[in-house]
Amino acid sequence: MAVIREKTDDTGAVKVLRRNLDDVVVRVYSNTDTITLLSDKIKVTDSSGNGVENWAQSVGYNSSNMTVHSGVTLPDGYIAKKFTYDGTTWAQDSNWESPVGLLIGPLVSSINESATSLNIINIKMEVKVNDTIQIENEKLTIVSIVDTDNCTVARGAASTTAASHDAAKLIYKV
């Protein structure tokens, strides 16, 4: 398989996709994959030319803000987005938060502590009514699925406190 996600024990050479703003490695691929950075997206194909992954404009990754490094050896304990890499040196990202459940994806737009509508890409595929999700330290209960990317929630589930959350904060199903 060409895409290597959440890889934790491989010491072989790989390609890494690094976000330039903070040097965080967002994805790791086989060293034989081709990663093409375009102005509006990132396209990944395997050694046979088959499409592996496309990072669309909505994700915000493109040739102006991402870098590919080839022939890289992963650090011990590697997990996607846990480490920074400057092209030479690995370090654990100071903003890393250990996953609390199954990763659903990032929050598309910021919410305040009273918001009950969430915009999360493909949320309909990931949860169902009455499931519990978590954003930072707050747990939320899914009340309804509005459409593919939107749902309504009850805030402060499981005795947590409703809080504001910035766009791009990760959401987990717990």
Image (cartoon, rainbow, N blue to C red):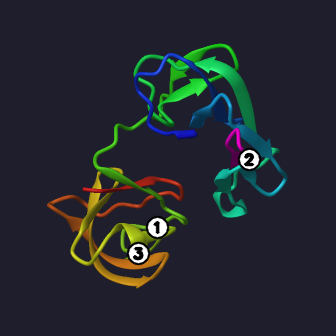
Q: Is residue 121 left or right of residue 100?
A: right
Horizontal and vertical percent position of residue 167:
53, 59
Q: Nearer the viewer, residue 61 or 163?
A: 61
At 23% from the left and 69% from the top, the residue drawn is 131
Q: Can you identify the residue that label 1 sits on?
A: 111
Number of residues whose C-alpha sits closer than 10 Å to that of mark 1, classed few (under 14), some (14–19) or many (20 or more): some
Horizontal and vertical percent position of residue 163:
35, 60
Q: Can you identify the residue that label 3 sits on?
A: 124
Horizontal and vertical percent position of residue 137:
29, 51
Q: Earlier in the sequence, mark 3 or mark 1?
A: 1
Q: Can you identify the residue that label 2 sits on?
A: 49
* Main SS class of the magenta portion in the image: loop
Q: Is residue 92 above or below residue 99?
A: above
Q: Is residue 144 above or below residue 37?
A: below
Q: CA distance from mark 2 to mark 3?
A: 31 Å
Mark yes or no: residue 57 visible.
Answer: yes
Q: Considering the numbered disc 1 on the image, is that residue within a helix, a strand or a loop?
A: loop
Q: CA distance from mark 3 to mark 1?
A: 19 Å
Tell me whether circle 1 and circle 2 mark residues in contact (CB < 8 Å): no
Tell me which corner region of the image, top left, top right, bottom left or bottom right, holds residue 141. bottom left
Q: Considering the numbered disc 2 on the image, is that residue within a helix, a strand or a loop?
A: loop
At 53% from the left and 55% from the top, the residue drawn is 168
What is the magenta range?
A: 44-48
